[in-house]
Amino acid sequence: MIQRYIRDVPDFPKPGILFKDITPLLQSPEGLKEVVSGLAHAVDPSSYELVVGIESRGFIFGTALAHHVGKGFVPIRKPGKLPWKTASESYQLEYGSDRIEIHLDAVKPGQSVLLIDDLLATGGTMEAALRLVRRLGGKPVACSFVIELGFLNGRSKLDTAVHSLIQY
Ligand code: AMP
């Protein structure tokens, strides 16, 4: 039961948002184990060579999963954080836009990739992450999330297999 480790925080970071706080899940040895093995079972590890995680909570689950299944990990970061040459993609937010970046040599042409983030809302962030991986020649196999806000229908934006451990 991963649900019982997710804390709902109303009006964070701004009024009207019900924030899904995953820190109690990380704090719990059983919760953390359940989520990492859930992600490992959602997509057959023999179908991907690399795990790509999105800043910042995608780093936590992505790295734990990569270690668990014996793969490497690649971070997709907010602008200006990666030290070397990057590719960059922007995406729409409710107000304005944002950008994410990846190192140019992080994914090799033809490499199969599993993408990870903590939560799927509108899907804009993961859609941009898929564009980044494809620009480097990577082959996205699937996107996995711990939480999916199904009522926002973010998965309709994603042209890969989509998995989530809990849906609201
Ligand atoms: P989106 O691009 O709309 O799918 O938003 C996904 C990103 O925003 C993820 O990296 C989430 O961590 C974060 N996010 C969006 N909505 C929430 C929420 N209600 N609670 C926690 N994180 C959220």
Image (cartoon, rainbow, N blue to C red):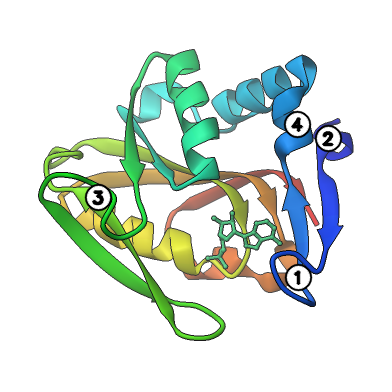
Q: Disc 4 vs disc 1: Cβ atoms closer than 8 Å?
A: no
Residue bearing the label numbered 2? 5
**Where on the image, by quarter, is ligand 1?**
bottom right
- Image location (x, y in percent) of residue 79: 30, 60
> SS for tag 2?
helix
* Mark 2 residue crowding within 10 angstroms, few (<14) / some (14–19) / many (20+): some
In the rendered view, does 24 fall on the left or right side of 77?
Answer: right
Q: Disc 3 vs disc 4: Cβ atoms closer than 8 Å?
A: no
In the rendered view, does 145 fall on the left or right side of 132?
Answer: right
Residue bearing the label numbered 1? 17
Q: Amino acid at mark 1?
A: Ile
Q: Quadrant of residue 88?
A: bottom left
Residue bearing the label numbered 4? 25
Q: Disc 4 vs disc 2: Cβ atoms closer than 8 Å?
A: yes
Q: Distance from label 1 to label 3 (Cα)?
A: 28 Å
Q: Which of 31 and 141 lies nearest the eye of the viewer? A: 31
* Mark 1 residue crowding within 10 angstroms, few (<14) / some (14–19) / many (20+): few
**Which is more N-terminal, label 4 or label 3?**
4
**Which is more N-terminal, label 2 or label 1?**
2
- On whether ligand 1 comes within 8 Å of the CB at mark 3, the answer is no
Q: Distance from label 3 to label 4 (Cα)?
A: 28 Å
* Mark 3 residue crowding within 10 angstroms, few (<14) / some (14–19) / many (20+): many
Q: Distance from label 4 to label 1 (Cα)?
A: 20 Å
In the rendered view, does 86 fall on the left or right side of 2?
Answer: left
Q: Amino acid at mark 2?
A: Tyr
